[in-house]
Image (cartoon, grey):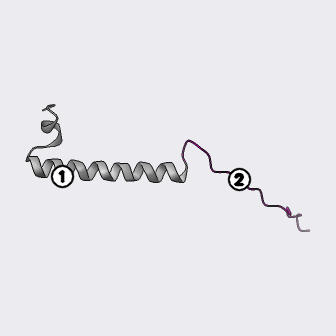
Amino acid sequence: MDAPQPSITPQLTEPKFGFNDYSERLNGRAAMIGFVLTLLIEALSGQGLLAWLGLR
């Protein structure tokens, strides 16, 4: 015997905070930009990032 199927599909809203597609995509893009900027700083200054920040 087949189970009855619902006649209406629920319309779920995307959460405003936490782990959702938008926040994860934004975080990934920010990380990529930071990594590229770090590489540019090291290439242009000839020093590592820690030395450039005065931590080494």
Q: Residue 12 carries which label?
A: 2
Q: Mark 1 points at which residue?
A: 40
Residue 27 coordinates in the image, percent (x, y): 42, 48
At x 11% / y 50%, what residue is drawn? 44
Q: In the rendered view of the protein, which quadrant contains the N terminus? A: bottom right
Q: Which amino acid does label 2 sit on?
A: Leu
Residue 55 coordinates in the image, percent (x, y): 16, 31
In the rendered view, tell whether residue 43 sits above or below residue 4.
Answer: above
As for residue 4 lying within the magenta part, the answer is: yes
The segment highlighted magenta reads 1-19
In the rendered view, tell whether residue 43 sits above or below residue 17.
Answer: below
Residue 53 coordinates in the image, percent (x, y): 17, 35
- Occupied quadrant, residue 47: top left
Q: What residue type is labelled 1?
A: Leu
Residue found at the far top of this picture: 55
Query: Which is nearer the eye, 26 or 55?
Result: 26
